[in-house]
Image (spheres, coloured by chain):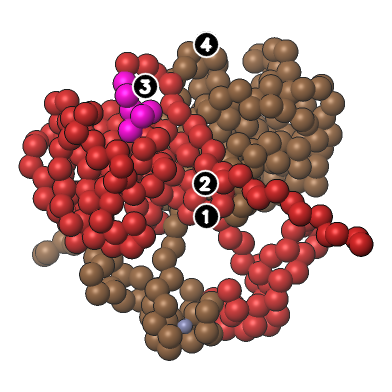
Chain colours: A brown, B red
Amino acid sequence: MEFCSACGGRIARRIPQGDSRPRHVCTACGTIHYRNPNMVVGAVCVWEDRVLLARRSIAPREGFWTVPAGFLELEESTADGALREVFEEAGARCTVDRLLAVYDIPEIHQVQIFYLATMTRPEISAGIESVEVGLFTWDEIPWGELAFPTVKAVLKDWQRLRDGEAVSRRDFIRPKPPVTLPDDQ
Amino acid sequence: MEFCSACGGRIARRIPQGDSRPRHVCTACGTIHYRNPNMVVGAVCVWEDRVLLARRSIAPREGFWTVPAGFLELEESTADGALREVFEEAGARCTVDRLLAVYDIPEIHQVQIFYLATMTRPEISAGIESVEVGLFTWDEIPWGELAFPTVKAVLKDWQRLRDGEAVSRRDFIRPKPPVTLPDDQ
Ligand SMILES: [Zn+2]
Ligand SMILES: [Zn+2]
């Protein structure tokens, strides 16, 4: 962020009075531009004993398989957003059964919320962000070609939690490389 | 949003190619500025049979009581953010027990996530955003002076779910006023 979205002035990083961390502050109008992690919503959509997956036509991880998911829009609920992504990416219609998982990925400034959903009809079709879509039994899931760690996690959580009521919460935090202390010799 | 935060150019609202809704697009450098709802994190913090509340020193709802909660920072997990808010607003130290509730409030572009937490010591102290803080039994909770509908909801969910495993998910959507059709006479 280099310029103020309110007035076009130059942005500086400074700690506002009463705050404890540096913010993007406009040097012209004084507006403080707070930043907040991005929310991704998605769904594990089930038809009988099969789960809906889409093979990505776009970066990142083009050609790999995912459950339908994407960024939440400004004026929709997380459940509505998940159902919108399901329809946009895989042409499927679902109803939401329950909240399935909340994943934190602070390293990429994301919180991901996944719902368990039941398809209301078996028709599916690849949207613009998908090369192909498919319904997979557990043994047919292309485990070696999944797009992201969260896709594998949410499929496992779906199996683990299918009869229970718990919601999975996981932190996806890549281990930091060991700190190399400066050699003082 | 009037100006591009990347280059300072003028922003126009238009539907980018391959998209289906209007976005803030820079007329100078072409950057599409997506917007995403804000994430609020908080905690129901318990010491023995009492729950921690803070009376707000700031707008909105100055003087009313709330559970500690606030905007998630960019590089923290939702649970870490909740514990940070607890310490900042009420000087309390807690450990997170479980995810308690996910509330959607699309009207104000918020998703709120609440944790159930146990205080590790009874000391509390009002932070800069609080007039006072207190530990309340269920019957002592100032129900008529709670700051927001979500505060009442999460306290009720805490009682309802205390022995169970379910996570509450609620939509806070104000009913739209009835549409008045133009009179064609
Ligand atoms: Zn400005
Ligand atoms: Zn620009």
Q: Nearer the viewer, residue A40 or A59?
A: A40
Proximity of marks 2 and 3: CB atoms separated by less than 8 Å: no
Picture residue at 23% right of the left edge, 36% below the top: B141
In screen coordinates, is A130 left or right of B51? right
Query: Residues at marks 4 and 3, common chain?
Result: no
Query: Residues at marks 3 and 1, common chain?
Result: yes
**Cα–Cα span, label 3 and label 1:** 26 Å
Q: Which amino acid does label 4 sit on?
A: Asp
- Identify the element where label 2 is drawn: strand
In screen coordinates, is A23 left or right of A144? left
Proximity of marks 1 and 2: CB atoms separated by less than 8 Å: yes
Name the residue tied to disc 2.
B105
On whether ligand 1 comes within 8 Å of the CB at mark 2, the answer is no
On whether ligand 2 comes within 8 Å of the CB at mark 4, the answer is no
| Chain identifier of the residue bearing label 3 in the image | B
What residue span does the magenta drawing correspond to? B155-162
Name the residue tied to disc 4.
A163
- Given this view, does label 4 or label 3 mark the residue nearer the observer? 3
Q: Position of residue B131 (x, y in %)?
A: 18, 57
Query: Residues at marks 2 and 3, common chain?
Result: yes
Picture residue at 81% right of the left edge, 55% below the top: B181
Name the residue tied to disc 1.
B108
**Cα–Cα span, label 2 and label 3:** 21 Å
B157 within the magenta span? yes
Q: Residue B161 bears which disc, if any?
A: 3
Q: Position of residue B95 (x, y in %)?
A: 22, 34
Picture residue at 57% right of the left edge, 46% below the top: B174
